[in-house]
Amino acid sequence: MPRTLEPDGLEQLAAPLPRQLATLMRPELPSLAKEIIDEIRRAIPEYGSPMQGPYVEALHIGVERALGHFVEQIADPSAPRERHEDTYRRLGRFEAQEGRTLDNLQAAFRIGAQVAWRRVMRVGPQRNLSSAVMAQLADTLFTYIDDLASLALKGYLDALPAEELEEHRRRLLHLLLRRPTASRRAVQELADLAEWDVPEEATLVAVPHGSRIIRTSLDPDVLADLTGADPYLLVPGRMTADRQRMLAEALPEGRAVSGVSVPLSGTADSLRWARQALALVDAGIMDDGPVTRCEDHLIELWLLSDPALVDQIARRHLAGMAALNGGQRHRLLETLHTWLTTRGTAAEIAEELHVHPQTVRYRMRKLEGTLGERLTDPGSRFAIEVVLRAMWLRRRNGEVAPDEAGGQDAADAATRSGEAREVREAQVTREPREARESREPRKSGEARRGSLSALDLGTGAAAATDAGIRAG
């Protein structure tokens, strides 16, 4: 039976490879080096020509020393590594000094590993290597190649000027925002060049154009593009209190808006929301401050994300209001907005609006006549509430329809006259609530909740009116 080389004991994966392997591998090195160099020059144009020159010379040195040192480590794992490590750091520095990326050198490492493994697969069975030794040799080979790539990367980064490292970070930032999203491998490779740890999630930050930013106040892991018309930052992780303080210090004379914290695949959305919120802050619709967080204003962002669409919803659900003049429409919508948002009684709504409770009842009756069943249909009522909330947010910026900004016309005056008449009648006919309730049959909750027409919105029975407004 032919003798095979086996690693000793159960700890074969942790133990060194059999030293006899070095003796079997040395005769293969010259032809293997030539095969690797030929394959690299065929696959990577930069190494293909000219036949002479520093690029090709570096390729020969790198391949021959890598193979020689790999075999030396098998023969004697305690052999010195310093000279070998310095060779690959120098290869990385050479790529940086020549103004190239590390892509070609790392591709050459991968090709070298593939060619070497093909040779092992061909020669191993001929030399009676067991499957266990072959598996251990594969692990050792690919780990060795990864170490070479890491050494070259370190040398490359050491040789990069500060502005080049910053350029890698800008490229990485743009890659993270690309749609469709880049592959995890592409992100990781560029992140290695940028010396940046890839997080699970990030928060994008929009900064006003022309803001003075103290770069030294930014945390080292913050990516920034401050050169365009719409500068922005990427903050790894969530927008914590410490991160907010950091942004406030970096923008001593300005402000910033942080988007929602998202996985890296959602960074473009986070930046879009941050820029939308920044525009709302500039318009005075959102509260200003050193750092405004989108996560505190999600409803406002949603309601104001498409004003034209909100206007279309308003036309469909508030069509009956078009016949009213601006002043009438404003007062009725203000009353309806307060009722929908507070669900209060007539007295509570009146206190909120600084009017008489009977004025509230008059307006609600007017609204019922104008909007009809839309006030009792859940879907329509939700749509109306969305529209009114959006309108009130827009009014914070002084957005008022042209006919609402003018003076009162005849119809407006008539409306005010009707409200005043309702108040006078209420004052004449008012009597103690206990006396009224003792004479009037109690209305059921179902009757009150059915529709606004089931409510007593006239001058009598104020208690029933209040209950109806609350339930409606």
Image (spheres, rainbow, N blue to C red):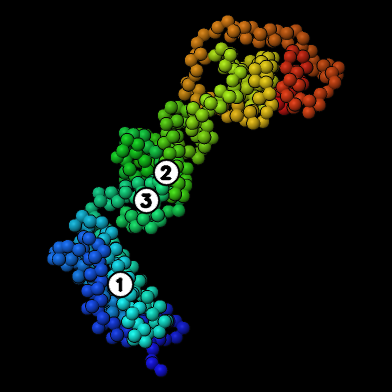
Q: Residue at x 55, y 6 (%)?
A: 409
Residue 27 visible in the displayed image: yes
Name which residue type carries label 3: Asp
Q: Mark 2 or mark 1, which is nearer to you?
A: 1
Q: Is residue 379 left or right of residue 247?
A: right
Name which residue type carries label 1: Val
Q: Quadrant of residue 354?
A: top right
Check disc 3: other Cα within 10 Å, few if <14, some if 14-19, many if 20+: some
Label 3 near label 1: C-beta < 8 Å?
A: no
Q: Position of residue 129 (x, y in %)?
A: 37, 85
The residue to which callout 3 is attached is 221
Label 1 near label 2: C-beta < 8 Å?
A: no
Which circle's residue, 2 or 1, is located before the other in the chain?
A: 1
Gap between marks 1 and 3 measured at Cα: 38 Å
Q: Residue at x 45, y 53 (%)?
A: 200
Q: Position of residue 279 (x, y in %)?
A: 42, 31
Which circle's residue, 2 or 3, is located before the other in the chain?
A: 3
On-image quarter of the N terminus = bottom left
Name which residue type carries label 2: Ala
Q: Is residue 86 above or below residue 305?
A: below
Q: Is residue 154 above or below residue 170?
A: below
Gap between marks 2 and 1 measured at Cα: 41 Å
Q: Position of residue 299 (x, y in %)?
A: 54, 35
The residue to which callout 2 is attached is 268
Secondary structure at badge 1 equals helix
Q: Residue at x 75, y 7 (%)?
A: 428
